[in-house]
């Protein structure tokens, strides 16, 4: 009963925020970036809640908490320092200023304007559409499984309700609604995480007893030969922390911030948020060693069911009222991620492809209508993929992080800081990421009978290679190709053609 009531209140609040956001959304810029007027706390919470979803709290926490024990906390530290603090300090100010100089609302538009190459916008938009749409579907699927199999709500019903609620508040309110819901969801995530850890630690005998017992039980449950080595931990830290620097749904948060003065404060706020959320998730995951002697298996198979561990541990050890709060925590984490992914995917089609190439003269009011329509379409597409579990799309899900982060991270960072970066080097970077990730999967599938399982085993390291290699490709190709025109560089970096926004900032 507590779960039903809390979910009902949560959904009503989300829809109300969507209706309120609709009144604030008058232009395409309002819908996609909130008018570039998002303040400190909403910017910080929007970044943090988009970062973490149900995948962290259920799948990652259970699997890595069991396999890594307390070493999983290194990932939480990396997410806080690399994925949050450094991301804000290195990317935040430059991204805001340069995207305003270029009048770019999306990452594909940034590549087009920064490198004076329209083909980059088309390629980037296609990559986003192909790989972020199944990524969105995977979040829907994770939520449906969680509620359907672990908490007694049917998979189909849970999936349908998640789809409807996310679609309503996003389509109505756009980025305004997303940011306000992120703020509400962020508070739920913080409160739920802290109370969850406090109650579990008390249940298992207190902090000192818990930490000592986790270490002892981990040594019993995971033999030294199966414990992760340094490179395994390091690759996970790098991928989950620095990979966000190239993910459009994360970088978009910097486009929308109100001014440079909030960046340091937002960086600190986001870092604290990430420490609490990721730390709570992975520490809870490590406590599975206190609840299980062996990993549960999927019915009818011998495959480990890591997704079962956290829900089962929580339902066994927490009271009903707190379990209802945890469900809201997981739901909040996922819905904020979902809304950002859908917004970016819809923008790739409606802003970058349709308005950018097919019909540049489309009126502003029709542009706003189209991105609302495309947001609804992408929600429906994601729901269909999650419902029918289309095999080809499911395969793309496993490639999405490596391809998108690998294709965009290096050229985006070089584009912000190095004036000599060329369009051809960006193209080479995108092709490299596709070849490394897609080529590795194809080779393993053809070489081994269990090729997909083998790929999953090495997918983190393959993604890291796809992310790192372009940092060499971009400067080499840039130095071998023609330098960008001075007018393009001046516009991007605010040289002779400094924007009104920059002049105002200097005056302030």
Image: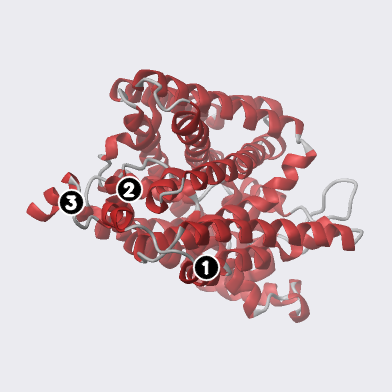
Give neighbour class at mark 1: few <14, some 14-19, many 20+ (Cα, 10 Å): some
Q: Does dot 1 land on a helix, a strand or a loop?
A: helix
Q: Does dot 2 land on a helix, a strand or a loop?
A: helix
Where residue 74 appears, as percent x and y from the top left, is 53, 71
Where residue 176 appears, as percent x and y from the top left, is 34, 32
User: Residue 313's mark?
Assistant: none
At 56% across and 39% down in the image, what residue appears? 320
Q: Do the residues labelled 1 and 2 touch (CB within 8 Å)?
A: no
Q: How many marks?
A: 3
Disc 3 designates what residue? 502
The answer to whether one can see residue 38 in this image is yes
Where residue 368 appears, as percent x and y from the top left, is 39, 23
The answer to whether one can see residue 203 in this image is no
Q: Which of marks 1 and 2 is in front?
A: 1
Give neighbour class at mark 2: few <14, some 14-19, many 20+ (Cα, 10 Å): many
Q: Which of marks 1 and 2 is nearer the N terminus?
A: 2
User: Residue 477's mark?
Assistant: 1
From the viewer's perspective, is residue 390 above or below residue 304? above
Where residue 486 appears, as percent x and y from the top left, is 30, 58
At 64% across and 37% down in the image, what residue appears? 137
Give neighbour class at mark 3: few <14, some 14-19, many 20+ (Cα, 10 Å): some
Q: Nearer the viewer, residue 318 or 159?
A: 159
Disc 2 designates what residue? 99
Q: Rounded to the nearest whole Å, what is the CA distance between mark 3 and mark 1?
A: 31 Å
Q: Which of marks 3 and 1 is nearer the N terminus?
A: 1
Q: Do the residues labelled 3 and 2 touch (CB within 8 Å)?
A: no
At 35% across and 35% down in the image, what residue appears? 180
From the viewer's perspective, is residue 330 above or below residue 172? below
At 53% across and 24% down in the image, what residue appears? 376
Q: Rounded to the nearest whole Å, what is the CA distance between mark 1 and mark 2?
A: 24 Å
């Amino acid at each position: 009963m507590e779960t039903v009531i809390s979910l009902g209140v949560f959904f009503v609040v989300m829809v109300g925020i969507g209706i309120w956001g609709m009144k604030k959304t008058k232009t395409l810029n309002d819908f996609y970036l909130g008018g570039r007027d998002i303040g400190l706390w909403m910017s910080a919470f929007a970044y943090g809640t988009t970062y973490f979803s149900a995948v962290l709290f259920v799948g990652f926490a259970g699997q890595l908490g069991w396999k890594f024990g307390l070493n999983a906390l290194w990932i939480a530290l990396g997410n806080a320092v690399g994925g949050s603090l450094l991301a804000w300090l290195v990317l935040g100010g430059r991204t805001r200023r340069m995207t305003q100089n270029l009048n770019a609302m999306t990452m594909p538009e940034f590549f087009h304007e920064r490198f004076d190459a329209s083909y980059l916008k088309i390629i980037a938009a296609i990559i986003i559409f192909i790989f972020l749409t199944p990524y969105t579907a995977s979040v829907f699927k994770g939520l449906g499984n969680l509620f359907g199999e672990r908490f007694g709500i049917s998979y189909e019903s849970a999936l349908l309700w998640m789809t409807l609620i996310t679609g309503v508040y996003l389509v109505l309110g756009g980025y305004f609604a997303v940011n306000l819901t992120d703020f509400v969801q962020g508070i739920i995530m913080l409160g739920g995480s802290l109370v969850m850890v406090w109650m579990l630690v008390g249940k298992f005998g207190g902090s000192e007893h818990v930490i000592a017992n986790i270490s002892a039980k981990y040594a019993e449950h995971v033999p030294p030969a199966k414990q992760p080595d340094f490179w395994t931990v390091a690759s996970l830290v790098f991928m989950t922390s620095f990979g966000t620097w190239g993910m459009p749904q994360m970088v978009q948060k910097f486009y929308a911030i109100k001014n440079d003065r909030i960046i340091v404060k937002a960086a600190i706020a986001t870092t604290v948020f990430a420490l609490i959320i990721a730390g709570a998730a992975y520490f809870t995951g490590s406590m599975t060693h206190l609840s299980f002697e062996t990993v549960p298996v999927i019915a009818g198979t011998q495959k480990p069911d890591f997704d079962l561990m956290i829900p089962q541990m929580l339902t066994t050890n927490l009271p009903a009222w707190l379990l209802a709060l945890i469900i809201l925590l997981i739901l909040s984490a996922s819905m904020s991620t979902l809304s950002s992914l859908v917004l970016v995917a819809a923008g790739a089609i409606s802003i970058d492809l349709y308005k950018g190439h097919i019909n540049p003269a489309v009126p502003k009011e029709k542009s706003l209508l189209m991105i609302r329509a495309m947001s609804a379409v992408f929600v429906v597409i994601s729901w269909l993929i999650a419902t029918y579990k289309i095999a080809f799309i499911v395969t793309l899900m496993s490639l999405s992080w490596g391809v998108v982060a690998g294709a965009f991270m290096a050229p985006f960072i070089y584009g912000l800081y190095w004036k000599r970066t060329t369009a051809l080097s960006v193209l080479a970077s995108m092709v490299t990421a596709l070849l490394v990730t897609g080529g590795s999967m194809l080779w393993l599938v053809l070489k081994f009978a269990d090729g997909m399982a083998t790929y999953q085993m090495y997918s983190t390291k393959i993604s890291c290679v796809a992310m790192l290699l372009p940092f060499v490709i971009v400067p080499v190709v840039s130095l071998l190709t023609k330098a960008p025109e001075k007018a393009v560089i001046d516009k991007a970096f605010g040289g002779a053609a400094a924007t009104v926004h920059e002049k105002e900032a200097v005056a302030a």
